Image (cartoon, helix red, strand yellow):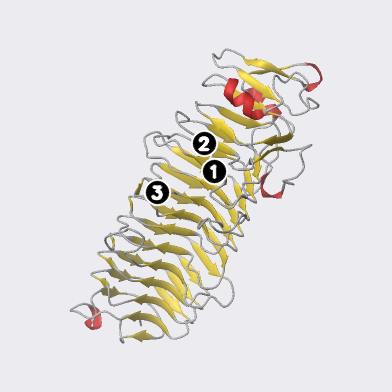
Amino acid sequence: MRGVRRRILLRAGTGACSVVALGVLAGPSGAVGMRLVGQAHPTVVVDDDKRQCPQAQFTDLRLAAVAAPAGATILVCPGTYPGPVMVTKQLTFIAKNGGQGAGRDPQDSDQQAIVVAGTNGDGFTLSSNSSATTIDGFVVTGGAQPIFDAGIDVTDPSGNGYRIVDNLITKNNVGMYFHSPGGAHSRIEHNAFIDNNEGGFPSPNTGTAIFTQLQSVNDTTIANNFFSGHTDSALNLGDGSQHGLTVAENVSYKDSTFLVLGRATGSVVSSNLIVGTIPMNSAIYLFGQNSGVRVTGNYIQSGPGNVGASGIRLTGPFFGAVGPNTNMTITNNDISNFDYGIRGSNVDHSWFSANNTHDNGVDGIQMTITAVTNTLRANHADDNGTWDCEDQSTDAGTAGTANTWTNNSGDTSNPSGICH
């Protein structure tokens, strides 16, 4: 299996060797044949100049996507391919030399299959009937017009079962507009989203890696991706109700915010590494009507001088959310260098445990006057600027607060006794 490279975080993609292993016939001198052994669906080969794949049937990826039958695999050899590539059926797009991660050169068309967004369009547009489409191993760039252009744009109102894996998505207005109303599980994994800030206004969403536009992201895993340099957020998933969402084991480096999430139920945010969040922005922002969401095992460290922001912020209701955050589990997170490690507002009947908040400018953990009937247990807070633990609410709970604090450690607390 020569030619398949391993790397940390971003796994090896599907190169020529692994395509052969799937049953594609390899012709002489490395040319790839045109059928899958023992499979009903054909493989269509595309090469913009027919240098790497002289037996390719198409030089234009857009035409190949139109001509290929539903269920086909489109193997794309290195080259530059204009978009938008319109997808109106289930297709599997595989870049021949894909899967080399964030370190690959997005302009090296001798090694990469590069899809460049159209003048007024996207790189890939997954429209009606595109469920279960796979996009694997591409560089997707150039969606830089001022209005809503993306590297990958999912517009199918009922689409699900997508696989977006091992792509480098960079220098677009938005990295990806994505929604999936649920059913078959969708997976966004092992991609690198870097500097998708192009175009500017009038698009309000410039600077986001993955954005949900008035839709839901259900039954979807977003895992093992690398995000960097986004001026709005890595993930903005608050524009519709979400359930069955998993955001896990991603790396976010110098993004304005890692995750904006609202109206989510039964979802998990776990084991993400978030480093260098820029000033005035919280790393994980839960803006209301979330219920039963678990935020666990994340390492969150701000960049220098992050005034006014929190590592984990529970707030709202904002942006169309109509209720507080309820039945939340915030546990085993390590948070430092913000103004507030964890700051809870408009949150009730939730559980905060075993978090480590340290070296924050104001408070390690703060519950405001609208945080009530929560349990805070076995958290550790130290070396925070004003209070290690603070609760501004009042009622019949611990030390006259509206919450229950047990076995929390910290040198300073307000009121006295909630941490000791």
- Label 1 secondary element: strand
Give whichever of 409, 398 is nearer the camera. Answer: 398
**Residue ID at (55%, 73%):** 279
Check if mark 2's residue and mark 1's residue have beta carbons within 8 Å. Answer: yes
Q: At 33% from the left edge and 61% from the top edge, which residue is drawn?
A: 288
Quadrant in which residue 108 is drawn: top right
Question: In x, y percent, where is residue 308?
Answer: 47, 77
Marked residue nearer the N-terminal end (3 or 2): 2
Q: Which mark is residue 214?
A: 3
Judge whether 21 appears above or below 9 on screen. above
Q: Amino acid at mark 1?
A: Glu
Look at mark 1 in the image and give the residue it sits on.
189
Residue at 65% x, 51% y: name it. 171
Is residue 412 visible in the rendered structure shown here?
yes
Residue 164 place in picture, x, y as percent: 54, 39
Where is residue 334? Give x, y as percent. Answer: 48, 67
Q: CA distance from mark 1 to mark 3?
A: 23 Å
Q: Is residue 143 found left or right of 182 in the rendered image? A: right
**The N terminus is located in which quarter?**
top right
Q: CA distance from mark 3 to mark 2?
A: 21 Å
